Amino acid sequence: MSGDPGATGSSAAAADPGATGSPAAGADPGATGSSAAGVDPAGGLRRAAVVAGRLTWRAAPLAVSVQVVCMLAVAAVPVAVAWLTKLVVDGLADGEPLSALTALAAALAGAGVAAAVFPHAGQYLRAEIDRRVALSAEDGLYRAVERFTGLARFDSPEFLDRLRMAMQAASTPGAAVAGGFGLLRGAVTAVGLVGSLAVISPVMTGVLVLTGIPMLLMELYLSRRRAAMMWLISPTERRRVFYQGLQENPQAVKEIRLFGTGGFLRGRMLTERRTADAAKRREDRRELAVQGGLALLGAVVAGAGLLWAVAAARRDALSIGDVSMFVAAVAGVQGALATLVQSAAQTHQHLTMFVHYVTVLRTGSDLPASPAPTPVPRLRRGIELRDVWFRYDDGHPWVLRGVNLFLPEGLAVALVGLNGAGKSTLIKLLCRFYDPTRGAILWDGVDLRDVDLAELRTRIGAVFQDYMTYDLSATENVALGDLSALDDPDRVRAAARRAGVHEVLDGLPRGYDTQLTRSFFGGSEEEEAQAGVRLSGGQWQRVALARAFLRDQRDLMILDEPSAGLDAEAEHEVHSRLREHRAGRTSLLISHRLGAIRDADRIVVLADGVVAEQGTHAELVAKPGTYARLFALQAAGYRDDAEVNGRNAKSSVDVSALARDCIDAS
């Protein structure tokens, strides 16, 4: 066995020509250059604003254009109302002709109609923009996640938190753009009214504008704090969602009811909820104090301005119309400044969230891709693991410690070992979900890192121990093994027959069109008639096998505990079918039930991350070793109790002899 690369530091890994520096070797896959609080500096916000703007324009250009027109009209209304009110009041005071007053009154009424109608049109347009942009944003996000061809990113809690926040941002991406619209609307209104006030009193105008500066600065400060708080409580929220999800998980509900753990888990959920609520409450109180103080400042300034206007009117420095416009303009400027400040804060907060979205989009693949990938050759010689070392990151122990193994083409190889021996990890490396920390895996002599990854995976069929149960129809659950069979019911049924589950699926209320879930149906009679069904664990296991059988012409078949959920008769049937299926094909089989793999062409025993033994079943039971001991222990359970007790009474046990004696009994 080669020396431990961890004993020599990074130089050992660097010296290995097979080392690639993949994220699985210890680099933080979630590290993307943003700050620890998840908030990028100004450059990140500008980039997020550009991405949000482009996304919005491409998704709904016409709606955005009309929204801008509506927004400008709404922004201009307060300015128009202030001036028209002044002119009407002054006209009445000066005895203007009725026709002139009627025209001004009609214009004022038109402004009122615009103020009533345009906001509703803008609200509808915003909703439509949000829907279209959210559709495009979610598509972009999931496309980006699909580029993470390995699993290393999903091992990082930081990246999972970032991804969750990116999903939240993708669901409401138009909010940042809507905040920008609010900024523009507030700016147009404020500029128009400030200009109007400047005509009356430049000094009071300056005072009003100066009061808006602390409002803007404090709102931005509060926005940054809230974004940072959301990032910090993200792990707490994730744990709360986990505990909450247990209440609707049928598998969890069984144990919760039986063990009476509902109160305990509810307490955990409420604790996480209280922790998150406490953090939010602290921010709410801070915002209440700051915004209340700013509102008080605004009220004092407005009151002082009103007193000044009244005094100026008494000195005949202002006309009655000037006073009315001053009052309307002060209220309008303060409202516009409040809208401007709130829009700026909301835009900042939404862009801060949108930074996570942009970061995920800009994050590269977790597995390096060859610039000129080699075509995957049809497997003719076999797959070789050459001095393969692997650990999930630098903080974890080595899972594989220099594995050297050859899987010959056309033969069935079985992996045996205790839990944690590295069997499932080896499968993940063969599928190139990770790259070896050191060493190489060769497909007919070609390093897996040099071939096209998508093409490689089309050559592999697999049943994983932790197979998925999809809330889809029976046809879709099988066809997900090879989507080309989705419109070929004969292929789906043939695969189900080989897995021994055709009769079950065909006998469902709607046959293969039956939904294998009851999660999406309500309580109406019509929905109940179309409601799905839940399969048993063993039936789901066969559905997973059927998915694998769709890939019956692939170069490598991986079977990880394919019969773990089956009874003895079903297990015997499945393994008989699997023996027929893998005859003459390269296959890798993992099972803790050694009787199921005794007919493999080669059996490999993993222990402590290395290949401890390998050979045929007969060869391994003929010598004292791990396989003989494990086989003897399992086979002894099927023998007569008296005979077993008699052997246990001996002062020593010949493990090899016991294993050989157990062959017939098993």
Image: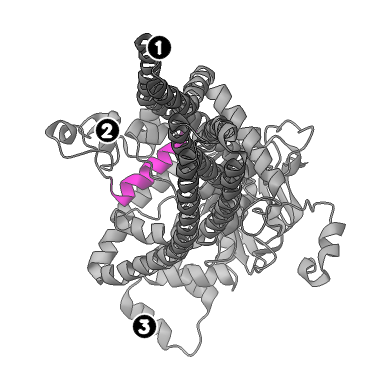
Q: Depth check: 55 or 121 in front?
A: 121
Residue lying at the far left of the rendered structure? 525
Asked which secondary structure carries label 2, the reply is loop
Q: CA distance from mark 3 to mark 1?
A: 116 Å
Query: Which residue is identified by label 3?
Result: 645
* Residue 59 appears in the rendering: yes
List the residue tagged with mark 1: 100
Residue lying at the far bottom in this picture: please name it: 651
What secondary structure is the magenta-colored segment mainly? helix
**Residue that numbered label 2 is attached to:** 514
Residue occupying the point 27% across, 70% down: 263
- Indicate the position of residue 221 as horizontal and vertical percent values: 59, 55
Q: Quadrant of residue 166?
A: top right
Q: Look at label 1 and name its amino acid.
A: Ala
Extreme-front residue of the structure: 315
Which quadrant holds the N terminus? bottom right
Between residues 182 and 529, which one lies in front from this camera angle? 182
